[in-house]
Amino acid sequence: MRPADAFADRLGLPVHDRELLEQALVHSSWLHEHRDLARGHNERLELLGDAVVNLAISEALYARHPEDDEGVLSARRAAIVSTPGLSRLAARLDLGSYLLLGEGEALRGGRRRPSLLASSFEALCGALYLDIGWPGTRDWIVTLATPELSADAPMTTLKSPKSRLQEHTQRSTGDRPVYHLLEASGPDHEKHFRIEVAVDGRVLGAGEGSSRRLAETAAALEVIRRERAAAREARAAARSDRRHAAAAGGGGGDRDGGGADDVAASGSGR
């Protein structure tokens, strides 16, 4: 049985165009090794699927959270359609097991890579939209994403690391983070990016990823983790100073400041 036939059975949807579904499962690395066995890879479908997923999720959030303003709805959507969010949806389908990957990509763990799963999920949604139409595709996406759509998570867990870092630096210095590309290596179907992030000319951290967006997110997350560690150390030092002062006969309360630790609220983004 072809991967597309097995996956169609798993989806339980009235899939008519199995060749289109198979194209959604074809990664560019596989097509590079088997040029005569498929009509194309899934990147065009990914572009279409990105719009399909965003509209389906936006519509569902608008209906399910009538009290949320635009900012909160945007944060909710960003959390769901982020790379980690879409890769979770893909994992519920066991999508990685059905993907057609090049030998090298498969050996490097491509079936479990969040960015590859997220883009493949978008390609799948694009193929379903073309095959079974908008209502069926929308309802399927909404059903699959029900746990995320219904979650009443705090705002801090919905914001991406880049958003949290920007809010922190604007509060503390008034400046926005700037991301600089350090290196882009590898073939087109397997790029690797190194990015550094700076504020007011001072480099705060760096990150790597299979896309520029993921490398920027990794850089922001590194800075957030450093700020959180520094804030913890500062609070521990302040508590130690107060204990020593109390032991020497001084007073003082036992309040901890927030400061830089505000940026460390949990959560991740695309």
Image (cartoon, rainbow, N blue to C red):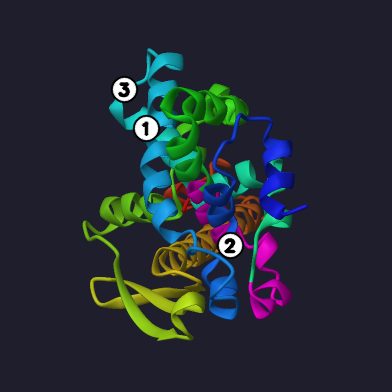
Q: Does the magenta-highlighted stretch encompass residue 8?
A: no
| CA separation in Å, label 3 and label 1 | 17 Å
Residue 266 shows up from this direction: no
Q: Which residue is mark 2?
A: 233
Mark 3 or mark 1: whose residue is earlier in sequence: 1
- The range drawn in magenta is 102-123
Label 2 close to label 3 by CB (< 8 Å): no
Q: Which structural element holds mark 2? A: helix
Disc 1 packing (10 Å; few <14; some 14–19; many ≥20): some
Of residues 92 and 69, the one drawn nearer to the viewer in this rendering: 92
Q: Is residue 36 left or right of residue 64?
A: right
**Which residue lies at the image location 49% right of the left edge and 76% below the top edge?**
189
Label annotation for residue 55: 1
Secondary structure mostly taken by the magenta-highlighted segment of the chain: helix
Q: Earlier in the sequence, mark 2 or mark 1?
A: 1
Q: Quadrant of residue 57?
A: top left
Disc ID at residue 258: none
Residue type at mark 3: give it. Answer: Asp
- In the figure, residue 233 lies in which quadrant? bottom right
Query: Quick one: label 2, few (<14), some, or many (20+) residues within 10 Å?
Result: few
Per the image, label 1 sits on a secondary structure element best described as: helix
**Residue toward you, 247 or 89:** 89
- Check disc 3 and report the residue beneath it: 69
